[in-house]
Amino acid sequence: MDKIKELIEDTNIKLTSSRKEILEVLSNSSKPLCYEEIKISINMDKATFYRNISKFEEENVIDSFESNDKKRYFEIKKVKHAHFICTNCSKIECIHEKLNFKLINHKIENIIIKGICPNCLL
């Protein structure tokens, strides 16, 4: 089974060509992407893109978050991990090291760490 079909096999998502295009771009990326980065590789209007993104989020296929640049970034939901966002250049990095954050009576769904990246520190 190909990886795109595996992503949606336990969901209520019908695999249309538009949805497949979006999922292929996201699954081939090693970092979260915003609409502007994705639209280069897809052939659909903005409304269709966001309608499909909304469905993917509903069905827990993708995660999203907003960055300093006020853009929403999307990625395939894999292993939960934190993100580092540089407050100077807005570069986003996935952090795959295990971070132990616990809050009593809370469920943490996303961790965003903001600071200055190594390139901007120079």
Image (spheres, rainbow, N blue to C red):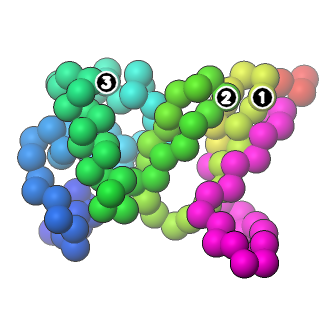
Q: Is residue 108 left or right of residue 42?
A: right
- Residues at marks 2 and 1 touching, judged by CB atoms closer than 8 Å: yes
Label 2 vs 3, first from the N-terminus: 3
Q: Which residue is mark 3?
A: 39
| Quadrant of residue 107 within the rendered picture | bottom right
Tell me the residue at 68%/56% (across/down).
Answer: 111
Q: CA distance from mark 2 to mark 1?
A: 7 Å
Q: Which residue is mark 2?
A: 68
Per the image, label 3 sits on a secondary structure element best described as helix
- Residue 15 in the image: x percent, y percent? 11, 53
Which stretch is magenta? 94-119
Q: CA distance from mark 2 to mark 3?
A: 20 Å
Q: Per the image, is 63 magenta?
A: no
Per the image, label 2 sits on a secondary structure element best described as loop
- Residue 8 in the image: x percent, y percent? 22, 63
Q: Residue furthest right?
A: 122
